[in-house]
Amino acid sequence: MERVRMTTRLVATAGSLALVAVVAGCGAERSDDAPLLWAEEFDGPAGTPPDPDVWTPELGGGGWGNEELQTYTAERANLALDGEGNLAITARATGPADNPLWTSARVTTFGARTLHHGRIEVRAKVPSGNGIWPAAWTLGQDIQRVGWPACGEIDIIESIGPATEALQTVHGPRPDGTNWLQSVVTPVDEPLSEDFHVYGADWSDDRITFSIDDRTTGSVSRADVPDGGRWPFDSPQYVLLNVAVGGRLPGPPDASTPRTATMLVDWVRVYAPE
């Protein structure tokens, strides 16, 4: 399925994040009253796959709509529990340094677990490096019927390059079939790759509010949809976790890029609306 970034970005810049504290003005803590609907904790022996009743690997290369370099596999070198309560998704370069072949992994809960309003949180430690693009995100469960971007997309967390910014984005459709998008971009004082953080998205009827470590970073509302665009978030979405390499965003890897780049996902939790 295609996942293409448009060159026009509507960006709302939040304050600088110093480890767990949002500094500039939008730091309301969420409450903990909402009931837990489902959770994936990724407990299990090292080298085993995530629960196949919940997580399905998406396989193959071909650029993924963004001229990306990786081929997604289900090999344990790319996708496995680490035995310490985390799912390890690893992008790996093999072959010569000047022309490596990249493999990685991408798993989804399509057809198994969804959310429809409420809150989703992902606790993860993302990798960094030029051309490295980890992400935890959602797509509409109706994607096979309506396509992208009509299905809608919520990017709970993406980071690129040195991981000095958290990108949290909403995508929706325009009448011509292209996408509109609006991003909350949060600069951080220390790279996100230094530690685990909890990335969240609260989804209501007319607003998606993003957070990091329980602090609000910004929101996108139905009222923010540009003229002619449509708010596509009125039906269930499923979860995706992946590490991509190269493409128009984030750009190519280079000699400084590590030959292995692992995103560790401690848990995914979905809560009912409060």
Image (spheres, rainbow, N blue to C red):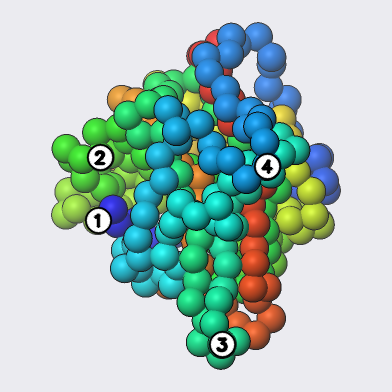
Element type at marker 1?
A: loop
Cα distance, mark 2 to mark 3?
38 Å
Residue ID at (62%, 45%): 47
| Comes first in the chain, label 2 or label 3 | 3
Quadrant showing the C terminus: top right
Residue 96 is tagged as 3
Cα distance, mark 3 to mark 4?
29 Å
The location of residue 167, given as percent across then percent down, is: 57, 52
Q: Name which residue type carries label 1.
A: Thr
Position above or below: 38 against 257: above
Q: Name which residue type carries label 4.
A: Ala
User: Does the rendering let one see residue 13?
Assistant: no
Residue ID at (50%, 55%): 75
Q: Looking at the image, is mark 3 or mark 4 nearer the viewer? A: 4
Position above or below: 117 against 57: above
44 vs 84, left or right, is left
Element type at marker 2?
A: helix
Cα distance, mark 2 to mark 4?
33 Å
Q: Looking at the image, is mark 1 or mark 4 nearer the viewer? A: 4
User: Which residue was labeled with disc 4?
Assistant: 46
Element type at marker 4?
A: loop
Q: Looking at the image, is mark 1 or mark 2 nearer the viewer? A: 2
| Comes first in the chain, label 1 or label 2 | 2
Residue ID at (65%, 32%): 44
User: Which residue was labeled with disc 2?
Assistant: 143
Give 57 or 37, whichever is nearer the viewer.
Answer: 57
Q: Name which residue type carries label 3.
A: Pro
User: Is the residue marked by circle 4 packed among few (<14), some (14-19), or many (20+) residues within 10 Å?
Assistant: some
Give 96 or 10, whichever is nearer the viewer.
Answer: 96
User: Which residue was labeled with disc 1?
Assistant: 178
Q: Looking at the image, is mark 2 or mark 3 nearer the viewer? A: 3
